[in-house]
Amino acid sequence: MRKFLISLPVVFFSVGAHAADLSKRIQAEVPVSTRDGHWEGFYFGATTQFNLANGHVSIPVYPAVFDLTARGFSGGVRAGYNHQIGNWVVGLDGNVGLSSALGTHNSQFEYVGGYHEIYHITERWNGSIGPRLGYSWGSLLAYVRGGWALVNIRDHFIPPIVGVQSTTFSGWSLGGGVEYALDRHWTTNMEYRYNHYGQHIIDHNGMLRLAYTSNQVSLGVSYKF
């Protein structure tokens, strides 16, 4: 009985030490991103996008109406701020990048010599900024975002009946995506956005109207401060 009583403190100490060691091990194995406020703070990163845009063109003086598709890749930067409330994440997100989306349309108007007039557009840059709302499951964040969108388009005719024009359109953006935390600072994300820029008169002596929308799929990596 005496031996048993003497051995009790040793057993309790051993069990306590083992439990403390197990607790530390479990804590170490839990991703850092599952701890409080992981998504909180400012972030900055780089993105690459694939753009698929649709343009609806009307030229009343011909008259002519036609559609065209512009596609291409773009690369740029993104930045924003997150505020975390439990599992919910709210914030402001923005991005801007150079674009290579190109689109052409061969018209039915035939010049002497048998060649047709070509309308050509180039999306030079695009960007958006707006609120973001997400829900996190530890390292994974799913979110929706909206806001204000901008795009700069350069267009011209071949052969040139008027000079090259560069016009900036503004509109609205709506989309969503998922973001994954690699550790406490680095994240990677995939996002889809639909941008609607409305219809605008391009300054070819007021002769051309262009309605423009785009679909963007982007991949990015960011650093959270």
Image: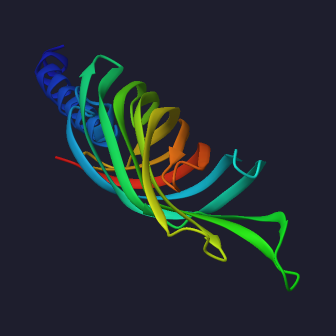
Residue 25 position within the rendered picture, expressed as x and y whole percent measured from the top left: 28, 40
Dividing the image into 4 quarters, which one contains the N terminus?
A: top left
Q: Measuring 35% from the left and 31% from the top, which residue is drawn there?
A: 130
Say left or right for 24 vs 130: left
**Nearest to the observer: residue 46 or residue 75:** 75
Q: Is residue 10 above or below residue 25?
A: above
Residue 198 position within the rendered picture, expressed as x and y whole percent measured from the top left: 55, 34
Q: Measuring 53% from the left and 48% from the top, which residue is drawn there?
A: 206
Quadrant for residue 221, please give it.
Answer: bottom left
Q: Is residue 146 above or below residue 21?
A: above
Q: Measuring 60% from the left and 49% from the top, which residue is drawn there?
A: 208
Residue 39 position within the rendered picture, expressed as x and y whole percent measured from the top left: 27, 33
**Nearest to the observer: residue 68 or residue 98:** 68
Q: Is residue 191 visible?
A: no
Q: Measuring 81% from the left and 76% from the top, which residue is drawn there?
A: 111
Q: How is the image coloured?
A: rainbow
Say left or right for 8 vs 67: left
Q: Is residue 81 above or below residue 2?
A: below
Say left or right for 203 vs 108: left
All told, the count of numbered labels is 0
Quadrant for residue 50, please give it.
Answer: bottom right
Q: Is residue 61 visible?
A: yes
Residue 86 position within the rendered picture, expressed as x and y whole percent measured from the top left: 29, 16
**Nearest to the observer: residue 65 or residue 77:** 65
